[in-house]
Image (cartoon, grey):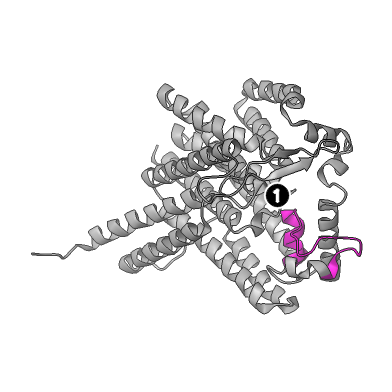
Amino acid sequence: MNLKISKTQALNLCQHGLELSLCLVIFSVPVSIAMVNIGIGCSFFFWSIRKILAKDFSLPHTPINVFLVAIVLLSFLSMFNTINMKTSMGGISKIFKNVFLFLVLVDGANNKRCLKRIIWALFAGLALVSFDGIFQYVTGTDFIHGTPLPRGLLDEFTGASAPRIGASTHGPNELAIYLVTAIPLLLSLTLYYFTAKRKLVFSLIGLMAAFCLFNTHFRGAALGFIAVLAFFGLIKKDVRFAVVLIILFLVLPFLLPKTIIDWALAHLNPYDFFVEQGGRRLHWQAAINMIMAHPVLGVGVNSFSINYDRYKLPADPFSGWYAHNTYLHFAADIGLIGLAVLLSMLINIILNWKKSYGRIKDSWLKATSLGVFGGFIAFITAGILESSLQSSNLAVLFWFILGLLVSVNKLGASDVNRL
């Protein structure tokens, strides 16, 4: 019995293994970081074997490679200021993991079949966590990890609290950012590509996800969702998004729990509403203090929390918290130069998408590009009120979305070249 396989067959097996591994990564983001890491490890294994067999040891060229190198170098340099080398080395390993995930995804997702598999896996994970969130809301416990339903603001008089869905994630804010990043892709494909039967199925998934998103009560995700609707309306010149936004503003007071409405009425000043006294205001001040003390290289990559008590205000009762702002947290960790690199990278991504989107002719790729970019907009907007890139799961989601965006735009450009 001849068990030998040709080089072409081996390369195909590696490609299929790589695709399935990437599917596992994006499916597992809202469910389990352990499964995510297994998927990343497997994808790197299959990618490496494929590279060796093909005798191709180059890394994929992307519009942000120079920024990736700069972030890695600045992270290393920031360790000169760290108070805990082990913690900072852990941060470096996370950065390497996510950067390599991005590069492997761009290199591996080089055809529509692979991209479609990945997106089906993303939607499967979205459907699972949305159903889990509704299950948690109804029964009081999610069925994946057995996490109790989180509670929100307390009513001053009754002591009742508004429930906040967290499902299988680490909390309502993390779930909200995941949902508001995934929903735009579902929305774009449903409105601008899927046929009638698929529209119905994915509309149901979208409604479940929207219910969970609403009941996270996270203001950052609300800002992200509004940004996406406004963006879609402008790009597609679709008046439906303006109508939806108007309806949302009109009915919101009747849908939100009384405790939240009462709290909002007591915080009508936008700054007080988003950066409330006794919460983010204190965390942001601790971050600003770190930046002022170490403006160039920060306090050390991944060391914000362990530095919190050293730089917080004397009246701050919190200990070991995050900044609840991606950009302040990033600057505190690796300095203002690092923040400038991050912001430059984000601007570069936006400009690249703007240049690429108009050239895409394939209807599926165009709807996918719009949806993935909408998720990117939602993620960076929600990051104003949460340390998104400091969450292991959300950091993976961010770099995965960037990889998808680059891959889709590359395929779109190659389609143009073939016409």
Which quadrant of the structure image shows residue 298?
A: bottom right
267 in relation to 309, above or below: above
Residue 333, placed above or below residue 126: below
Q: Say whether residue 295 is visible.
A: no
What residue do we see at 63% from left, 61% from top?
67
On the picture, is 403 further left or further right than 166? left
Q: Quadrant of the C terminus?
A: top left
- Tell me if residue 321 comes above or below residue 92 in the rendering: above
Residue range in magenta is 310-336
Which residue occupies 51% across, 51% down? 31
The single residue placed furthest to the front in the displayed view is 158
Q: Is residue 122 above or below residue 44?
A: above
Q: Is residue 400 left or right of residue 383?
A: left
Please name the residue shown 46% across and 29% down the image: 193
Q: Position of residue 192 (x, y in %)?
A: 50, 27
The residue at the far left in this view is 1
Residue 282's spot in the image, x, y percent?
Answer: 85, 56
The quadrant in which residue 344 appears is bottom right
Query: Where does residue 325 sit, x and y in percent of width and height?
Result: 75, 53
Residue 312 covered by magenta stretch? yes
What is the three-letter code of the residue carrying label 1? Gly
Q: Quadrant of the N terminus?
A: bottom left
- Seen at 85% across and 36% down, the residue is 157
Mark 1 crowd level (few <14, some 14–19, many ≥20, 10 Å Cα): many
Depth check, front residue: 94 or 15: 94
Magenta stretch: includes residue 170: no
Residue on which disc 1 sits: 383
